[in-house]
Amino acid sequence: MRRKLRLLSTLQKIDLDLDELYELRGDLPVRVEKLRAKVEMVRNSINEHEDFLKKGTADRARKEKESLALLERIEKLKDQQLQVRNNREYDALTSEIELAEKTIDEYEEEMEAFARQAEELRNELEGLDKELKELESDLEEQERQYKEVLESTADEEAELKHEREKIVKRLEASDIEAYERIRSAKGGKAVVEVRRESCSGCYNVVPPQRILEIKRDDRLFFCEHCGRILVSEDIAEDDSPVE
């Protein structure tokens, strides 16, 4: 049991050291990810604007070409009207002319609407391009800082994780599960020592009889108030390798 208590205590020390490393990085990882997401969002918006303008320009060119063709068609139809011999043929040509003129009017309205929208989108694109440059510059700086922090702590983190893995392999799955559950619920501290007759996690008094039992290092005890695993000062202060 003493071996298990020492392993749990050592695991706690390793995790606290890792927590300090992650705290050193601060919110840089989160800020970098948020900036990346913003950059991607603005890029997508720019692409959508540009695609709309490209398709709209092509559509306008098609309508202009079709309108010219319709105008030529109207002139020919009007010439044909002068040659018809009955009202039925004249009315049919008139209907075709009116349909062509209506189509041209619709095209003109659509092209004017696109021109107005295109102007708005181009103005928006200018703002988006400016925003993108600012975001990319900010992201580059944040990534540089994050990279520096990672490089300065990479070796220590790798060593701690390696030691942690060795400890975890030597503990039972149920002990790891209990440890992780308590650590998650108690702000990272699952194993604490009894110091000055109190739990050093919640600072509530530990009964004298329970302190004596804990000092024997032969059982797993939990704080009656906070639920953390309690170990003796002897266990907590022993930094020698666990056999």
Image (cartoon, grey):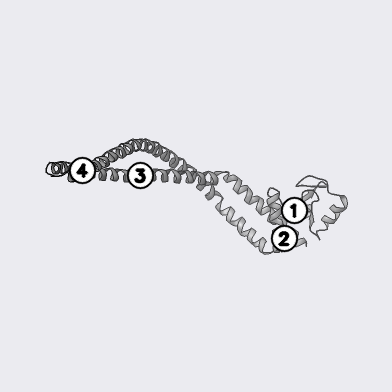
Structural crowding at the residue carrying mark 2, measured as other residues with C-alpha within 10 Å and reported as few (<14), some (14–19) or many (≥20): few
Contact (Cβ within 8 Å) of mark 4 with mark 2: no
Q: Earlier in the sequence, mark 1 or mark 2?
A: 2
Structural crowding at the residue carrying mark 3, measured as other residues with C-alpha within 10 Å and reported as few (<14), some (14–19) or many (≥20): some
Q: Residue at x 59, y 45 (%)?
A: 24
**For this view, does 207 lie left or right of residue 187?**
right
What number is the disc on residue 91? 4
**For this view, does 111 lie left or right of residue 86?**
right
Pick out the residue farthest to the right. Answer: 209
Q: Which residue is mark 1?
A: 236
Image x and y of residue 28, in percent? 54, 44
Q: Which residue is mark 3?
A: 52
Contact (Cβ within 8 Å) of mark 3 with mark 1: no
Q: Earlier in the sequence, mark 2 or mark 3?
A: 3
- Vertical side of 178 occupied by 81: above or below: above
Secondary structure of residue under mark 4? helix
Q: CA distance from mark 1 to mark 2?
A: 17 Å
Q: Closest to the observer: 111 or 192?
A: 111
> For the residue marked with disc 2, what is the amino acid?
Asp
What number is the disc on residue 177? none
Mark 2 or 3, closer to the camera: 3
Image x and y of residue 102, in percent? 27, 40
Contact (Cβ within 8 Å) of mark 1 with mark 2: no
Q: CA distance from mark 3 to mark 1?
A: 66 Å
> For the residue marked with disc 1, what is the amino acid?
Ala
Q: Could you tell me if residue 81 is visible in this image? A: yes
Q: Residue at x 56, y 50 (%)?
A: 153
Q: Earlier in the sequence, mark 4 or mark 3?
A: 3
Secondary structure of residue under mark 3? helix
Q: Which residue is mark 2?
A: 175
> For the residue marked with disc 4, what is the amino acid?
Asp
